[in-house]
Image: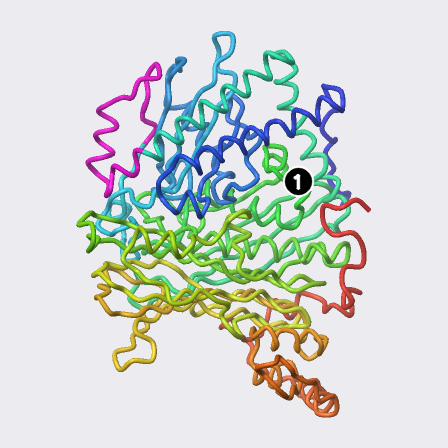
Amino acid sequence: MEPTTTVTAPALRNDPITFEVLRNAFKAICNEASALIERVSYAPTITEGHDYSVSILTPDGRLVSHGQRDQAPHMGTFEASIQHLVKEVAEFHPGDVFIYNDPYTGGTHQNDVKIIRPIFHGGEVFAFAIALCHWPDVGGPMHGTFNPHATECYAEGLRMPPLKLYENEVPNKPVWDLIDMNIRVPNERVAERYAQYQAGRLVERRLLGYVEKFGEQVIRDAFEDTMDHSERLFREWVRKLPDGTYEFTDWGDRDIGREDQPPIKVNAKLTIDGDQVTIDWTGCDPAPVASWGFARPALQSATYDGTMHCFPELAPLNHGVVRAINIVSKKGTCVDVEEPTPVTGYCSGAYEKVDCVAMACWGQALQKIDPTRVHAATVNLQNFCTGGVHPKTGLDFVSYLWLEGGQGARAYADGNSFYMMIFIGGASNQPNETLERWYPMYYTSTEAEVDSCGDGEFRGGFGLSRNFDVWGDTELVVLGDREIVGPPGLAGGTNGGPNILIRNPGADKEENLGMFTSKAILRKGDRVYFASNGGGGYGLPWKRKPESVLDDVIDELLTLEKARNVYGVAIDAVDPDALEYRIDETETARLREALAAKDDRPRGTAPFEVNPLGEDLFLPPDELGTSEGAPGPLPGEAA
């Protein structure tokens, strides 16, 4: 059968210099608006954690650009959001601004609140600006809105179809009152509303400034050129890959809404035919009862994210990539749920599994063409919410935070530690000092989670632990995953370590709270140990350079026991206080020979086991020529 090939997008409409100026200008506009949100908002989730996104879309809802620090789960849902808005609103007027967070028509979950502004020029809608923030609370029975035990969306939080938040630039008071009456700490959320509103106005001013300078048609053509450019790059890459179908499966820990709490399967088949790409998700399990899955717009976003990880030069995401990937799903599955299946836990549940599976499918096609684009699996989000009455101020509070963690190893290099790359490339830890000012917790440590990496010739990144003492009674809600199923390792590398949440570790009343906790009461004097996943490893651990293992031991990332038992490196601690360690080369050679002769490591999906699919489907670094590092330019670099 002859491969199917699509004619590449047409040549540039504008000259190359104008094209580059405007393509980067659209991104810069979104960056500036994102910075405004960061500076005007109140919640540390937004101001410190950067849980926001800003985008520009065409009047028919095609994505043009977004900001560099924006959240990957958000951006791929914006097209569905605008297309639904256009369908629902009969007529737009200058000065109209809409608020919208319905996850079934627009994607993600109720906490991700979009404020959308139609931008007019010449009496017509010229573009749309979206400014999205994760609000720490949008109501429901749980502080922070996440509800691990919800079996319907009605037990989660306030769902809003497109509502007119401003009319002729004047706040629509009934809508503002409706929101404030249904959420906790509404005075803080007013700041986010104003920040998002002003971000949309900023996008409008900057975009219309370019229209005035270059002319309307040049900007319209620049929209199209930007999309066409990304599509051309993507299809050129796909043509280099072997035609065929590539499949991978990952698992969620459990559906706590069912009596037997079964694991949840996420499966995809990626088919390449010429430059045509289809990713079929119909092999996924039925929708869970509890909050873990997501609706189709979020599936699309996760699929684009997994793809963009393998082709980073395509960033920022736009409609050129969107229209080049055919995504097939089945209503009623865990990755295409229907109302009223709960979805607040989507980003800790289905999202990272779809990302992992998409990267693994692409990785199979890429490994012999460009192995630098192959990634093992990464840290899984944990939604960690506390709330109550602050003992010092007497005021209500709600906090929302997560832990960064280990990224998956590459076929040529270790995974990064303490990042959240598949969620927010520009994420940063919310500083302990800020959190202590806002909430009744005293942080005792924030440090690397020792031995948490997935092991391999190239190891995964390390997880992170935050430990704190509670000095005021607080309600805790946690919705996470990857406690039972570790981020998959590849080519004989092991799966990454688990997410962990323990109350009063080491005490007689120690309790494993796990990743599905509702309304646990933290009392004054309780201690909390909260740690994140390490990323999956790549290749056989006993082929890792002994010097690299020694470096991790000196940095107190690996224990001497793991160095010996897993990596086969015998290290003598000569003077630990002076960081003086020495490799016993004779014993190391003996250990490594024994490990290679009898690989009896457990196979499975649990943390630190060898993932069977990852082992069978991926070639080790020595066969790929990557044991000494990248064999050529890194992804996105010129050859």
Magenta stretch in the rendered image? 161-190
Q: Is residue 546 left or right of residue 355?
A: right
Task: Find the residue positioned furthest to the top.
Answer: 122
Is residue 611 visible from the viewing direction of this image?
no
- Write the residue at 68% across / 65% down: 618
Q: Is residue 284 left or right of residue 136?
A: right
* Disc 1: CA contacts within 10 A as few (<14), some (14-19) or many (>=20): many
Query: Does the magenta run of residues contain 182?
Result: yes
- Rendered image quadrant of residue 173: top left
- Write the residue at 72% across / 75% down: 545
Residue type at numbered disc 1: Leu
Query: Does the magenta run of residues contain 460?
Result: no
Residue 102 in percent (x, y) is at: 35, 37
- Write the residue at 72% across / 67% down: 619
Q: Is residue 233 left or right of residue 268?
A: right
21 above or below 347?
above
Label 1 sits on residue: 314
Residue in the foreground of this view, choosing between 151 and 93: 93
Quadrant where the image shows the N terminus: top right
459 above or below 571?
above
Q: Is residue 613 left or right of residue 15?
A: left
Residue 14 in percent (x, y) is at: 72, 19
Residue in the foreground of this view, choosing between 639 and 210: 210
77 above or below 197?
below
Give the structural element (helix, strand or loop) at label 1: helix
Is residue 273 visible from the viewing direction of this image?
yes
